[in-house]
Image (spheres, grey):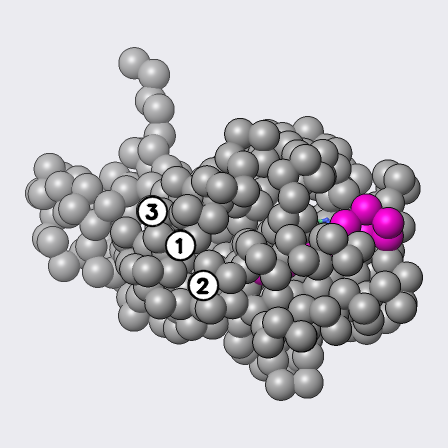
Amino acid sequence: MINEKINIRNLTDQEIINFLIEQGEKQFRKEQIIKWLWQKGVSSLNEMNNLTESLREKLNTSFYIDKIKIAEKHISKDTTTKVLFVTIDNLYFEGVLIPDRDRVTACISTQVGCPLKCSFCATGKIKYHRNLSSGEIFDQVFELNKLSEAQYKRKLSNIVVMGMGEPLLNYNNTIRAIDILTSASGLGISPQRITLSTAGIPEGITQLANDNININLSVSLHSAIDSKRDDLMPINKKHNLKSLSDAIKYYYQKTRKRITYEYLLLGEINDSYEDAVALTEFTKISACKINLIEYNPTENDIYKPSKKERVKQFEDYIKTKNLVVTIRKSKGQDINAACGQLANKKQ
Ligand code: SAH
């Protein structure tokens, strides 16, 4: 008989209980196992040293843990740290630790590569492999938190789901990881400190509202004109601005939470007066905040950042509409750790 082991971190609590019952074990063992998996973040079942040896053996016969490992670490001049992770099936992906005056933010990935292929983003240039599991998403926070304590003497304060991949195309695993990170039996991180960024998957946005996931939502807009957005973000051909706006309206109606829009300023592409007008029209649908993002160079150099005076004009126009707008300057550019630059050379 082929013994196909199961990833224990994919089991629900009930499935763990069922296993224990089947094996004639006590149900309180579930709490112990859960603690080892999600609070202590163990890499192997053998580390669960308050279980009996015979239970550990039974677990080893049926299950494995898909723990990721740190393969490389790069520290930027501005002390941003990029971490290259490797999965147990030898796939590489990245996470970033971003220290600031009063906080340390972890930027985590949800997929190995990304199927969306936005024209300005380095992740889209590498091969898309697969979704990360909820355990692998959890591990990034766990490992980056340890690193933050070692390196900056502080715990993580914020998490942004803005690394490689499209989180709403890996909805279940991403949300399960968030559930565990925020639950008392996991790491107990407040959902208010977590931001998920999406390229705009309407059904995912609707589902976030229906599931009452109390995190912050950020939408990568980059253009509020369909023809331009089609070129920048091919996903727009499938889900155009109208369907995106319907989903955002629904989300806002249900949650009353302010939406953040990310708008990458690409010189002479999406930084004209007409673009600013379209943006402020689009964002009328809910309370919002607009983050103008400086373009970070990738290996593909058909784009350039907007000129300083253009950025200023764009920002000023948005302000005339009484909208909240900030300019985001990325960190970690020198080690390719900034937004849109995650594309590990290992692939
Ligand atoms: N798929 C998700 C999350 C990953 S991208 C999303 O699209 O939101 C995280 C942010 O980095 C997005 O707003 C993305 O558009 C932006 N980004 C991508 N390439 C960039 C680049 N070259 N310079 C600056 N920001 C970039």
Taking the image as drawn, is residue 58 in sight? yes
Magenta-span inclusion, residue 37? no
Residue at x 83% of width, y 60% of height: 333
Q: Earlier in the sequence, mark 2 or mark 3?
A: 3
Which disc number belongs to residue 249? Answer: 1
Q: Earlier in the sequence, mark 2 or mark 1?
A: 1
Residue at x 51% of width, y 67% of height: 288
Badge count: 3
Q: Earlier in the sequence, mark 1 or mark 3?
A: 3
Q: Which residues are magenta?
A: 261-270
The CB of the residue at mark 2 lies under 8 Å from ligand 1: no
Single out the mark in the foreground, 1 or 3.
1
Q: CA distance from mark 2 to mark 3?
A: 18 Å
Which disc number belongs to residue 286? Answer: 2
Q: Position of residue 163 (x, y in %)?
A: 62, 52
The residue sitting at the bottom extreme is 102
* Position of 153 relative to 306 (above/below): below
Q: Nearer the viewer, residue 247 or 84?
A: 247
Q: CA distance from mark 2 to mark 1?
A: 7 Å
Q: Mark 3: which secondary structure?
A: helix
Which disc number belongs to residue 207? Answer: 3
Which disc number belongs to residue 50? Answer: none
Residue at x 35% of width, y 30% of height: 5
Do the residues under discs 2 and 1 have CB atoms within 8 angstroms? yes
- 266 on left or right of 320: right
* Position of 75 relative to 15 (above/below): below
